[in-house]
Image: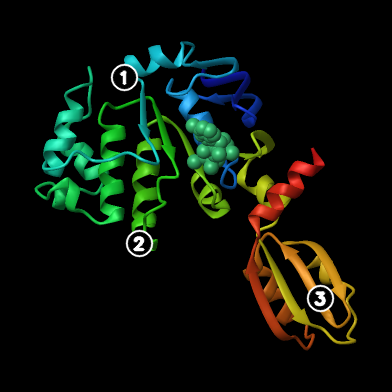
Amino acid sequence: MNAIAFTGVSKSYGPVRAVEGLDLTIDAGSTVALLGPNGAGKSTSIGMLLGLVRPSAGEIRVFGDSPDTAVKQGRVGAMLQDGTLVPGLTVREVVSFIRGLYPDPMPLEEILALAGLTDLAGRRADRLSGGQAQRVRFAIAIAGAPRLLVLDEPTAAMDVESRRSFWGSMREYAATGRTILFATHYLEEADENADRVIVVARGRVVADGTPNEIKAAVGTGTVRFTIGDQPTAGLDALPGVTGVEIRGSVAQLRTTSPDATVQALYATGLRVTDLEVRGADLEEAFLSLTHDN
Ligand SMILES: Nc1ncnc2c1ncn2[C@@H]1O[C@H](COP(=O)(O)OP(=O)(O)O)[C@@H](O)[C@H]1O
Ligand SMILES: [Mg+2]
């Protein structure tokens, strides 16, 4: 059965078309990234999926039911962008309270362990760092042992180490057969943590595939260097390279794997100077995908 089905779903706010004709189905048990720049319609889509935002057109099913029904039955857990934590309570009290609202919750200690909160359980939930607070929001989202977990840019306030441990927790939860949909504007996060990546821009799906397919479509970076008047043949055959542009004495390679490209580039024996490696300008890549559509 599909965990999620959107059929012709649109949402407008006055003249703003936040989501336009979204058709998609998500298999139960998969981990899917909704990847797109700010304003793409990710949060609006998630809001509609949770029954918090009413579509202007179209239909949404969650495990075959309406979003309201699925949420009421405790089959959906969510971590939203602007969730505030109740002041004055400890982490354990907050999680335990939320847990009590569900018919068949996870054991408290299991939730705390999975969210990496065991050592913080006695701390006040409103006095945590950004990354720690996000872990509490994650704990709240999984408390009811939902079959579908929805995360809207969950790592926004986190440093590198918190991100790493957060995605570890998420993958552990996914490994129990649950369905996960998360929004992000980082290609890297989508690549590392999802089975499938749905790229949205301006309210529409502009690409949909495995992380490898998406990386090949958008590229993940550019490698620029001065090549002078040396021969440029063969640059397009270097690992990861999806495009080559020569401007005067400067070569620019678009690549899905900057590390592999740079290594192979040095191995060619070419004299490479002024080497510059840049991550993909995703905004630009997304917009070019949109124009192709
Ligand atoms: N409540 C709202 N009222 C008016 N416009 C909104 C509202 N929510 C979202 N929008 C607009 O809809 C578009 C999509 O927003 P959003 O879904 O938040 O994108 P994302 O989460 O991908 O950044 C944006 O242009 C945004 O300004
Ligand atoms: Mg958003």
- Provide residue 95's location: percent of width, then percent of height: 18, 35
Q: Which residue is mark 3?
A: 251
Q: CA distance from mark 3 to mark 1?
A: 55 Å
- Provide residue 93's location: percent of width, then percent of height: 11, 37
Q: Relative to 229, is 156 above or below? A: above
Classify mark 2 as within 8 Å of ligand 2 or not, answering yes or no: no
Q: Which residue is mark 1?
A: 74
- Residue 293 appears in which quarter of the rendering? top right
Determine whether, in the image, residue 116 is placed left or right of residue 271. left
Q: Identify the amino acid type marked 3.
A: Ala
Q: Are marks 3 and 1 in contact (CB under 8 Å)?
A: no
Residue found at x 46% / y 10%: 65
Pick out the residue farthest to the left: 122
Q: Nearer the viewer, residue 140 or 16?
A: 16
Q: Nearer the viewer, residue 146 or 72?
A: 72
Q: Which residue is mark 2?
A: 161
Residue found at x 82% / y 71%: 235
Q: Identify the amino acid type marked 1.
A: Gly
Residue 128 visible in rendering = yes
Q: Identify the amino acid type marked 2.
A: Glu
Residue found at x 76% / y 49%: 288
Q: CA distance from mark 1 to mark 2?
A: 31 Å
Mark with earlier residue (3, 2): 2
Q: Are marks 1 and 2 in contact (CB under 8 Å)?
A: no
Mark with earlier residue (3, 1): 1
